[in-house]
Amino acid sequence: MSEEEDDQPLKQEPLINHLLELRTRLLKILIGVVLVFTPCAYFARDLFSYLSGPLLAAMPAKNSLIATGVAAPFLAPFKLAMLVAVAISLPWTLFQIWMFTAPALYKRERKLIIPLLASSTFLFFAGMAFAYYVIFPIIFRFFISVAPAGVQVTTDISAYLDFVLKLFMAFGAAFEMPVAIFLIVWTGFVSTAQLGRYRPYVIIAAFAFGMLLTPPDIISQTCLAVPLYLLYEVGILAARLLLPDTSDDADAG
């Protein structure tokens, strides 16, 4: 087989075959999530206790979380267990998506998809870990320290879960910056040299993003802004190494 023939999508299949394949992949994704959810549901209360650790560590010893809803003591840990199962099974889910889309991709695209999926998964989990171990302690200590005199901080477990999930998603998405930069360079939208010239704007945007997601102090903002900028540089470096022909005037960066 010639190089030109090898760099072509696989043979096209009838629409019904694609639909059947899609159903198979979705079922496998569902089965994977259910299998992971079973042990997560058993340890749901332990998972919630671990998740609430940063807040409880920042609260006075006499304070604790509360449940204002009748079913909240059950629903909040159950919801967390389901979301943890979805997160843990994410590599399996992405693999099934890859298996479904691979026949429609060119050879050069198939070589890049798996590394992109793996790096995306790793970076998303890294962002969540960064939020839990670095940002959460800073945020919760700040929020509790500014509570007015006479106000006892007793957070509802459902409200706490919703709050931390939003931060997990925000930081997980923010840590996808290297993958996003690689993709926009790969598609030819910008070059790495152009991205290098955008550095001053990226620094300002990183601190603005940190100001929006963290308490209004320079330490908290820096804890988020610096990693975001470093991830921007990682994205440029990855694009230059893996897509050298896109850096038309790399010396400008």
Image (cartoon, rainbow, N blue to C red):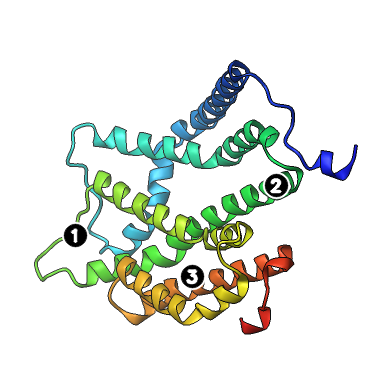
Given this view, does label 1 or label 3 mark the residue nearer the observer? 3
Pointer 1 or 3: first along the chain? 1
For badge 1, the amino acid type reads Val
Helix, strand or loop status at disc 2: helix
**Residue plotted at (30% across, 68% down):** 212
Decide which of tag 2 and tag 1 comes sooner along the chain: 2
Query: From the image, which quarter does the N terminus lie in?
Result: top right
Position of residue 192 relative to residue 172, above or below, is below
What amino acid type should be assigned to the residue bearing mark 3?
Leu
The residue located at (42%, 50%) in the rendering is 50
Q: Closest to the observer: 21 or 169? A: 21
Return the x and y of residue 111 as percentages of the image width and height.
74, 48
Q: In which quarter of the image is the C terminus?
A: bottom right
Q: Distance between the residues labelled 1 and 3?
A: 31 Å
Residue 149 percent coordinates (x, y): 10, 71
Secondary structure found at label 3: helix
**On screen, 172 above or below 16?**
below
Q: Is residue 236 left or right of residue 78?
A: right
- Distance, label 2 to label 3, CA atoms, is 27 Å
Tag 3 residue: 228
Compared with residue 124, is residue 95 higher up or lower down, i.e. above or below? above
Instruction: Look at label 2 and name its amino acid.
Output: Glu
Residue 218, position as x, y percentages in the image: 35, 81
Disc 3: CA contacts within 10 A as few (<14), some (14-19) or many (>=20): many
**Rendered image: mark on residue 109:** 2
Give the residue drawn at x 60%, y 56%. 187
Disc 1: which residue: 153
